[in-house]
Structures are given as structure tokens and as C-alpha cells.
Image (cartoon, helix red, strand yellow):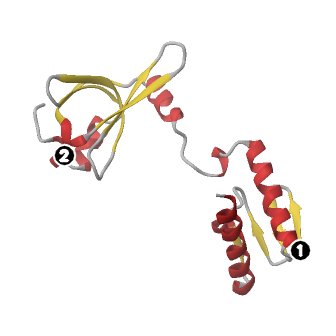
Amino acid sequence: MPCDWSHLGPLRWTRYVNKEVKVTAGKDEVFGGWLLTVDPVTASLVLVQLHAVGGASVQVVMGQAVQQVEVLQEADPGTAQRLHSLFPPPGPGAMEPQERVRRRCRVRRWLEKNRIPVEEEGEELKVAGALTIAAPYGHDDCSGANEIILDRIQKLLQQLDTSCS
């Protein structure tokens, strides 16, 4: 379908997601693959080529270069599942178990260094008996009713993160 791709908009772009497409861009350049997503700001396409041995390669086609997008086929359920498993959403489950343990230990040591009483309760850290810190143990992962303690612990965790980067 010849069109001004960047002006179609996100609602129309979603019709192409999880489909094998052929993209014509620039001067006679042709790209192919499964359309994983479209960047809503730049209209750039993220294409994935699935390899038979289980790997995949990713290619980005800049939105301003796109002249035509042609759908070749729909993804079957297995292909759709494989595409979605390539880039799992971020969250506590996305962090490797070893990294989660290292991060929990690093946060616990940091709090103890700052003379804050902390205990481990399963996967969570219990701080001063007043709040908990869940995986992945960042300042946004704190919860508790005492706003003063909550604010102080969140600031300490932000200092830890800035000192580590």
C-alpha cells in the first residue's frame, strides 16, 4: 500500500504489528521481516528476522525513509509467541535471579552502612519495621505508611543508584 507512512498514525500502524512485511524505503531499498513494533514518535519500524536455530536479528527502518509497507502474511500463534518472548516487559520477573540477590544484598549493606535497621523477609527487605522494599529494590519499590521514613529511605536508595552509575 503506497502511503505516507509517518502520517498514518499509531492506530493504523498497529494493524501491521505481528505480520511479516516488505518495506520499501529510500532509493530502491527493500527490507523484510516480522513487524514487532512502530515507534510512535519517529514512525520507525522494528523488524525481526527469525532464524531457524532459535536466534533472531533486529533491524530498524527509520520512519521518514518508509515509502511503502506491504503485508506478506499474518503470524501464526507460535510465531507471535516467539516474537513476544524476544523482548519481555521489564519488571521484577525480568531481572535475573542472581542479579536480584546481588541487588538485594547491595541495598541491605547500603542501608546498614547508613545505620538503618533492615531485615530480609523472603524476597523483600523490611526496613525499620515500617516499610518494605520489593524487587528490584529501587526507590520506586518502597511501600510503607510512614511518609517521613519512606521519603528518607527513597532518598538513600537514589543516592546508592547515583553512586553506582
Q: Position of residue 125 (x, y in %)?
A: 81, 64
In the image, residue 124 lies at what x, y percent?
80, 60
**Mark number displayed over residue 6:** 2
x 54%, y 18%: residue: 54
Give the residue pinned by disc 1. Answer: 117
* Residue 44 percent across, percent down from the top left: 29, 42
On screen, residue 22 above or below 132? above
Q: Given the current orientation, which residue lies at the most extreme top position?
A: 52
Q: Please state the horizontal and vertical placement of residue 108, each as a whole percent of the image.
A: 83, 63
State the SS at label 1: loop
In the figure, residue 105 lies in which quadrant?
bottom right
Which sits earlier in the primary sequence, circle 1 or circle 2? 2
| Quadrant of the snapshot with the C terminus | bottom right
State whether residue 72 appears in this view: no
Q: Quadrant of residue 164?
A: bottom right
Residue at x 44%, y 29% (from the top left corner): 80
Residue type pointed to by label 1 = Pro
Q: Residues within 10 Å of mark 1 (few under 14, many from 20)?
A: few
Instruction: Classify 29 as above or below 120.
Output: above
Answer few, some or many: residues within 10 Å of disc 2's Cα (few below 14, many 20 plus, some between 14 and 19).
some
Q: Residue at x 14, y 27 (%)?
A: 27
